Image (cartoon, rainbow, N blue to C red):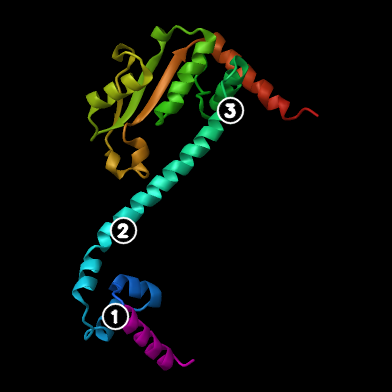
């Protein structure tokens, strides 16, 4: 088919779709033509009052569609969550120990001997870390928290947020580190909207025990 004939067929199709009450956006999506070309083709096409009213309702229809998709996705994820919850079940002490060791192996601080520390932007991960520390009967009053924030953040509000999330008093928070960069300039800034939080517990014996546990896990990969 020649390009001229194909163009003519597109014009006929566009006119037909417009007469059916389709919007310019819908027609362009179907035919892949420019807005200027479409305007020229359809300049003489008049819509009925009902068709005009229907086009005006397109934003509402789109929003209703989005809400339907969101509800469907939410329902699907809730079902997956319930399955995962059933599959995982309650943690035994050993399972909690191993889960925490894997977390520390990947994310924990290893450059500060005598200090067990985890730094993250996710409060859920840090709450799990605190629950894991309970296995070792740590004195929670000796846990220290330090925030890494940005100059455009509300410092007091952010500290109160982390204090509430971690169930730790502000008295255990050290002076936050404030970076002059504004949070709005950070890539993936939604992950940093409450800054980065470091939770630290000072204990040389606990640090050494955790490192040796990780060593056991590492060596297990080489066993026949």
Indicate yes or no whether the magenta region holds residue 18: yes
Q: CA distance from mark 2 to mark 3?
A: 38 Å
Q: Quadrant of residue 152?
A: top left
> Residue drawn 81% across and 29% down?
224
* Residue tagged 3: 88
Which residue position is annotated with label 2? 62
Q: Nearer the viewer, mark 3 or mark 1?
A: 1
Nearest to the observer: residue 111 or residue 71: 71
- Circle 3: element type: helix
The picture places residue 219, in percent across and down from the top left corner, at 71, 25
| Callout in the foreground (2, 3) | 2
Q: Is residue 87 left or right of residue 130?
A: right
- Image mark for residue 204: none
Is 202 placed left or right of 12 in the picture?
right
- Examine the structure image and report whether residue 4 is included in the region drawn in magenta: yes
Q: CA distance from mark 3 to mark 1?
A: 57 Å
Residue 115 percent location from the top left of the image? 48, 15
Q: Is residue 117 visible?
A: no
> Over which residues does the magenta segment extend?
1-19
Q: Residue 19: which disc?
A: 1
Q: Nearer the viewer, mark 1 or mark 2?
A: 1
Residue at disc 2, secondary structure: helix
Question: Dividing the picture into quarters, in which one does residue 145 lie?
Answer: top left
Which secondary structure type mostly characterizes the magenta part of the structure?
A: helix
**Where in the figure is residue 13, as x and y percent of width and height?**
37, 83
Of the two numbered discs 1 and 2 on the same chain, state the one appearing first in sequence.
Answer: 1
């Amino acid at each position: 088919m020649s390009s001229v004939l194909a163009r003519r067929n597109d014009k006929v199709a566009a006119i037909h779709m417009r007469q059916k009450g389709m919007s310019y956006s819908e027609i362009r999506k179907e035919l892949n033509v420019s807005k200027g070309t479409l305007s020229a083709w359809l300049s003489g096409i008049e819509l009925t009052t009902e068709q005009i009213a229907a086009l005006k309702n397109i934003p509402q229809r789109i929003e209703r569609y989005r809400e339907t998709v969101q509800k469907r996705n939410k329902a699907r994820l809730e079902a997956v969550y319930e399955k995962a919850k059933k599959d995982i079940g309650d943690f035994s002490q050993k399972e909690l120990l191993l889960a925490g060791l894997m977390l520390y192996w990947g994310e924990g601080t290893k450059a500060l001997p005598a200090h067990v520390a985890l730094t993250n932007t996710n409060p859920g991960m840090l709450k799990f870390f605190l629950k894991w520390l309970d296995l070792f009967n740590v004195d929670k009053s000796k846990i220290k928290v330090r925030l890494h924030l940005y100059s455009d953040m509300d410092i007091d509000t952010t500290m109160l947020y982390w204090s509430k999330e971690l169930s730790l008093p502000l008295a255990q928070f050290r002076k936050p580190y404030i970076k002059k960069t504004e949070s709005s300039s950070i890539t993936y800034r939604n992950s940093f909207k409450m800054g980065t939080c470091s939770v630290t517990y000072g204990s040389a014996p606990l640090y050494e025990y955790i490192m040796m546990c990780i060593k056991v896990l590492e060596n297990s990969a080489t066993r026949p």
